[in-house]
């Protein structure tokens, strides 16, 4: 079965550095097949059997053992990834300003009450919606200057997550269906 794995907080500054070639070799070494990486931010598409949570744990253990890399992996099947794409509540932003629309893939399902709390805590023009294990956030004024940080998002939602802009979300979806 085709899967997508996202690593949390890698290659952002001096910490948690990993080359995509090393990441690919790690995943191939675990016996997974048809491994492809995308960009330098820890995005991998691969073929494997097993449940996503078991794959996450295997990847996290292997990365810690081989590279000393202590980070979360978020694994979704290609079908789950397509559901993330299909559930996007911001189709206009996806079409007109995809780099300012983020999908925050989370470890746990997002509680709607916590999404409301997060939206109420926002001091800028950002807008948050969520479905299942994905929060969608529009940053109309850009991400770099926003006060809505990943730390605030995780604290308010009560779960860890990793974000990708909509362009990357769509590219990963294409890789997942286009190669297997």
Image (tube, rainbow, N blue to C red):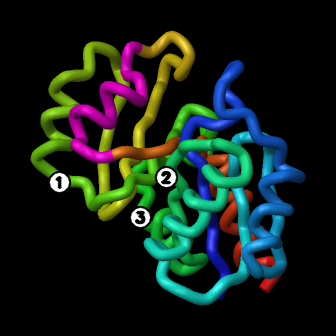
Horizontal relation, residue 57 to residue 2: left or right:
left
Q: In this view, does 119 lie above or below 91?
A: above
Between disc 2 and disc 1, whose residue precedes? 2
Disc number lying in front (3 or 2): 3
- Residue 150 location, x and y as percent? 42, 30
- Residue 74 location, x and y as percent? 51, 59
Name the disc covering residue 147, or none.
none
Q: Is residue 63 above or below residue 83?
A: above
The front one of 56 and 93 is: 56
Name the residue carrying label 3. 87
Which stretch did the figure color magenta?
Answer: 147-159
Q: Is residue 107 above or below residue 56?
A: above
Q: What element carries label 3?
A: loop
Q: What is the spatial separation of the Cα atoms under label 2 and label 1, in whole angstroms? A: 22 Å
- Residue at the image position 22 percent from the left and 43 percent from the top: 158
Q: Is residue 52 above or below residue 139?
A: below
Name the disc covering residue 111, or none.
1
Name the disc covering residue 91, or none.
2
- Residue 75 location, x and y as percent? 53, 66
Mark 2: give few (<14), some (14-19) or many (20+) Cα within 10 Å: some
Residue sitting farthest toward the right: 21
The front one of 56 and 125 is: 56
Residue 157 in the magenta stretch? The answer is yes
Q: Can residue 96 be seen in this view?
A: no
- Residue 176 location, x and y as percent? 71, 73
Q: Is mark 1 on a helix, strand or loop?
A: loop
Horizontal relation, residue 46 to residue 22: left or right:
left
């Amino acid at each position: 079965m085709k899967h997508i794995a996202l690593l949390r907080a890698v290659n952002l500054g001096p910490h948690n550095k990993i080359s995509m070639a090393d990441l690919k070799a790690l995943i191939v070494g675990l016996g997974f097949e048809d491994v492809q990486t995308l960009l330098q931010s820890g995005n991998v598409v691969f073929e494997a059997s097993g449940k996503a949570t078991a794959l996450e744990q295997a990847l996290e253990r292997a990365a810690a053992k081989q590279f000393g890399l202590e980070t979360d992996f978020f694994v979704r099947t290609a079908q789950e990834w397509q559901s993330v794409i299909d559930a996007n509540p911001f189709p206009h932003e996806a079409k007109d300003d995809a780099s300012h629309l983020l999908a925050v893939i989370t470890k746990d399902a997002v509680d709607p009450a916590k999404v409301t709390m997060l939206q109420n805590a926002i001091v800028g023009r950002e807008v948050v919606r969520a479905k299942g294990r994905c929060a969608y956030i529009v940053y109309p004024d850009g991400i770099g200057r926003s006060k809505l940080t990943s730390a605030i998002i995780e604290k308010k939602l009560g779960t860890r997550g990793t974000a990708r802009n909509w362009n990357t979300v769509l590219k990963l979806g294409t890789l997942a269906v286009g190669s297997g």
